[in-house]
Image (spheres, helix red, strand yellow):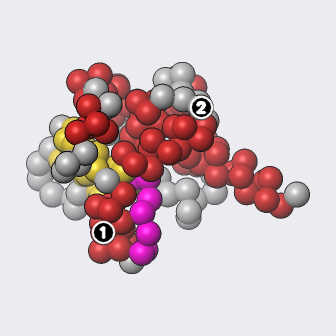
């Protein structure tokens, strides 16, 4: 399920075609692979900031948050929250449409729900994200962009 929660921001809600994102979410879940329900909240910088502070102790907005469901009987994998404000800025910065940036963020979040952690692994998540990015014909994903920015900063 994909929901948009942007009270009073009809223009940004209207710019996202949720129906067009659902088939991508289904295909990406199969490719990761994840079996089960994933709920996606498309929200504001303010709300994702609140969630990031409450659940990760980080007092700032971010682009995507992943909330894996605890192991239990049922068919729920977890939840994703994506800031449409941050996604729109990143889409503009990297020169592609908002729906493409949302797909990049969905893919990144799904990998986290599958147990990948680029902050702790030895590049496994980056490799898997790159493989899936190519399969879905997406531009460089979050880890690839962060790695490139880090490399530029070391020069």
122 in magenta: no
Residue 32 x/y as whole percent: 41, 36
60 in magenta: yes
Where the C terminus falls, by quadrant?
A: bottom right
User: In the picture provided, is 152 more to the left or to the right than 128?
Assistant: right
Residue 4 x/y as whole percent: 22, 42
Where the N terminus falls, by quadrant?
A: top left
Residue 79 seen in the figure = yes
Report the Cα–Cα distance between label 1 and label 2: 28 Å
Residue at 30% x, 69% y: name it.
50
Task: Identify the disc placed on residue 95.
Answer: 2
> Where, by quadrant of the figure, is residue 45 drawn?
bottom left
Do the residues under discs 1 and 2 have CB atoms within 8 angstroms? no
Vertical placement of 5 versus 62: above or below? Answer: above
> Where, by quadrant of the figure, is residue 17 drawn?
top left
The residue singled out by tag 1 in the image is: 50
Residue at 23% x, 24% y: name it.
19
Residue at 42% x, 75% y: name it.
59
Counting every numbered tag in the picture gives 2
Vertical placement of 91 versus 54: above or below? Answer: above
Vertical placement of 59 versus 145: above or below? Answer: below
Residue 38 seen in the figure = no
- Badge 1 marks a residue whose secondary structure is helix
Magenta range is 58-64
Residue 67 x/y as whole percent: 30, 58
């Amino acid at each position: 399920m994909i929901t948009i929660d942007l009270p009073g921001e009809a223009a940004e809600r209207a710019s996202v075609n949720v129906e067009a994102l659902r088939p991508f979410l289904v295909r990406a879940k199969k490719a990761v692979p994840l079996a089960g329900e994933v709920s996606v909240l498309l929200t504001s910088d303010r709300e994702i900031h609140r969630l990031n502070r409450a659940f990760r102790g980080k007092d700032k907005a971010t682009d995507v948050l992943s909330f894996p469901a605890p192991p239990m009987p049922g068919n729920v994998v977890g939840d994703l929250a994506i800031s449409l404000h941050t996604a729109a800025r990143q889409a503009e910065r990297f020169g592609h449409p908002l729906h493409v940036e949302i797909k990049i963020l969905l893919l990144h979040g799904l990998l986290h729900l599958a147990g990948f952690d680029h902050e702790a692994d030895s590049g496994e998540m980056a490799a898997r994200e790159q493989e899936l990015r190519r399969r879905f014909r997406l531009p460089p994903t979050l880890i690839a962009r962060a790695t490139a920015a880090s490399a530029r900063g070391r020069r």
